[in-house]
Image: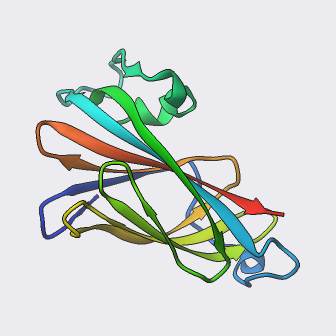
Amino acid sequence: MKKTSSSLLVICLSLAPFLVCAEDSVPGGGAAQSVTVEVRTVEASDPLPQLPQSEAVLINVAAQLDDLRPQLQKLHYRSFKLLGVQSQVVQLLQKGTLVLVNGHSLTVRPLYVSSKRIGLWLKWRDNTGVEVLDTRMHFDPGESMLAGTESEGRKGVVLAIDVKPVR
């Protein structure tokens, strides 16, 4: 967890390990030269009290987010609603910016594409331009990574990020 200067709590969840194999560290190499980045912006609401891990809580997840249910279950909110979906093709080692439905922006730069993983630098800014997250992530194709922050009104914003090579 990381606190930014605006006291936003940032949560990053993924089932993917963050280690980079030596074969993945070289850009290109016959692999795809661009990736499709898809971002689902999710509103999390109805915060849950801190409960012991063994207690299961029933959460309300929009049908379009059902594939994320196991990851969303780990967050301390009861309801999750899809606000919007943005998608963009970005060339390897080039930057692209997605403007999200809530006024936030996500700037991405694909670092490498291999047969097993995709490396992506990303910078998330809120609707006032304050940096929420600046990091590198390593994606397994077909797996969504979640990044989230608390916002005003006892709600949270979660970004579900998917990256796929363009072949």
Q: How many marks?
A: 0
Image quarter in which the N terminus is found: bottom left
Residue situated furthest top in the rendering: 58
25 to the left or right of 39: right
Instruction: Residue at 31%, 58% (x, y): give it.
Output: 104
- Vertical relation: 48 (above or below) 87: above
Instruction: Residue at 20%, 37% (x, y): give it.
Output: 155
- Residue 82 lies in quadrant: top left
Whole-percent x and y of residue 13?
Answer: 44, 49
Camera sees residue 76: no
- Residue 36 lies in quadrant: bottom right
Residue situated furthest right in the rendering: 30
62 to the left or right of 30: left
Q: How is the image coloured?
A: rainbow
Whole-percent x and y of residue 70?
Answer: 50, 30
Whole-percent x and y of residue 101?
Answer: 37, 48
31 to the left or right of 8: right
Instruction: Residue at 68%, 76% (x, y): give it.
Output: 112
Whole-percent x and y of residue 131?
Answer: 26, 70
Image quarter in which the C terminus is found: bottom right
- Vertical relation: 110 (above or below) 103: below
Instruction: Residue at 59%, 82% (x, y): give it.
Output: 94
57 to the left or right of 108: left
